Amino acid sequence: MAIKIIGGGLAGVEAAYQIAKRKKNVILYEMRPEKLTPAHKSGLLAEIVCSNSFKSKDIGDAHGLLKEEMKILDSLVLRIAQETEIPGGKALVVDRWKFAERITEEIFKNQYIKVVREEVAEIPSGVVIVASGPLTSASLADKLASLTGRNNLYFFDAISPIVDGTTIDMRKAFFASRYSEDSSDYLNCPLTQEEYELFYRELINAKKVEFKEFEKIPYFEGCLPIEVLAERGKNTLLFGPMKPVGLKDPLTKKTPYAVVQLRREDKEGSMYNMVGFQTKMTYPEQERVFRLIPALRNARFLRYGSIHRNTFINSPEVLKNTLQLKEDERIFFAGQLTGVEGYLESAATGIIAGISASFYVDGKRFIPPPSTTLIGSLINYITEKKAHFQPMNANFGLLKGYKRKEKNTLVERAMNDLREWQKTTQ
Ligand SMILES: Cc1cc2nc3c(=O)[nH]c(=O)nc-3n(C[C@H](O)[C@H](O)[C@H](O)COP(=O)(O)OP(=O)(O)OC[C@H]3O[C@@H](n4cnc5c(N)ncnc54)[C@H](O)[C@@H]3O)c2cc1C
């Protein structure tokens, strides 16, 4: 029986290609062009809806390494992106229409894949990969909510920036939880009144990204952008995410005027999340404004803050690391729906879901790539239990041992380990 894939976007076409390579039949359901999403304009498979950049080609950059890993796994999306590349400096930039046309052509000519132009409103029988993306149609989203539990399906993300732990100035930060100086749960970045006032002014005046028409939403009080909170008054942040209450700076032995709290994203402390700092500031403005926080003067941002229209599931709660639903193993998830963020990341999970579903059909045990590889570490991130799950993009901080190893060593190890892993998937 054919494996059914819902969604002919980046993740869906990758999954289909990987399954077809293993000589298994696929039915790929895509609702466009009969029913468009609010962002897509055509019926082409793998249409990319915003930037036409697949980010850095430099292997010393996480997206460069991700490309090399995807190449090892024979990614269709990467191959066609390279074939339709247009000049874009260090980034892999594509002619978006040629890219989507060539992908569509490859999928249609594949003898194992049948494309059905239809909106799926019920989860079909048999083995299914759900890859319907951030703009999943309402009727399917409703079914996914019943499948995963309503509390485990989200329609917006409110993402705080993540800072590289090795770039925080620890002389200007201190560990403590409110009212507990012994705790290392939070890393606190204090500001004096003067530093706060400068930060506040720049935050208010910074350039913000406008919402697209379909993204306009009433904000939830619990996840307001930091700048919207700031606009309510100069002292609002001091009673909200920057409140210093219960914290004493060991250097001054006093309660600071304001504090930014960072929470560990991993046990090693490679990545720190800026608590409550979801924002619509542009990426360059986030760097400029957040670097006004003394401990973050030289900070490198592994993920920028954002607020998007998105659809994603609470993967750590509902998915196994094989990308199968814990409660119903015949159902797999791939793409942005799993809580990865970005074109390449979505396609990468499509590769893994495709291989994993093929193993399942053959009755073989699937073990995902190790977390010394970027793809493996992404899968590990989205499926490992955590208290605050928000979508994640590829970055070096995800790699096992990031703080202790040189970047070159990490890259070499990732490539070698993925090559070894790939041999187990033939
Ligand atoms: C507006 C917007 C802009 C973005 N811009 C960028 C960017 O610039 N750079 C970046 O790296 N990432 C961007 N992303 C994030 C993300 O990487 C992309 O959305 C990416 O395309 C996700 O891949 P996917 O395969 O999971 O979903 P998609 O590529 O969206 O594919 C899902 C497919 O499923 C189809 N579908 C939906 N519901 C059904 C249904 N019920 N039945 C059948 N078919 C269905 C859709 O028509 C679509 O073709 C953006 C996301 C959004 C929403």
Image (cartoon, rainbow, N blue to C red):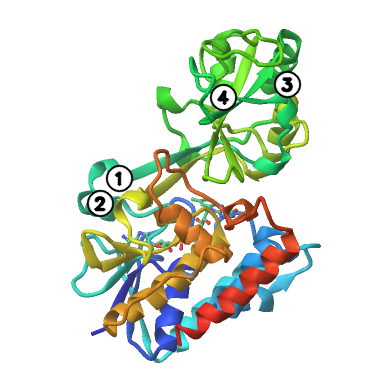
Of helix, strand and loop, which one carries label 3? helix
- Which residue, given by chain and number where applicable, does mark 1 sit on? 152
CB within 8 Å, label 3 to label 1: no
CB within 8 Å, label 2 to label 4: no
In the image, 91: left or right of 186? right
- Which residue, given by chain and number where applicable, does mark 3 sit on? 202
- Alpha-carbon distance for marks 2 and 4? 30 Å
Q: Residue 55 appears at what percent x and percent y?
A: 68, 59
Of the residues under marks 2 and 4, which one precedes in the sequence? 2
Of the residues under marks 3 and 2, which one precedes in the sequence? 2
Of the residues under marks 3 and 4, which one precedes in the sequence? 3
Q: Mark 4: is the Cβ under 8 angstroms from ligand 1? A: no
- Give me the residue at 30% from left, 50% from top: 138
Residue 23's disc is none
Instruction: Check disc 3: other Cα within 10 Å, few if <14, some if 14-19, many if 20+.
Output: some
- Alpha-carbon distance for marks 3 and 2? 41 Å
CB within 8 Å, label 4 to label 1: no
Q: Is residue 181 above or below residue 374?
A: above
Instruction: Check disc 4: other Cα within 10 Å, few if <14, some if 14-19, many if 20+.
Output: many
- Which residue, given by chain and number where applicable, does mark 2 sit on? 148
Identified by mark 1, the residue type is Asn
- Give me the residue at 56% from left, 24% from top: 226
Instruction: Check disc 2: other Cα within 10 Å, few if <14, some if 14-19, many if 20+.
Output: many
- Alpha-carbon distance for marks 2 and 1? 6 Å
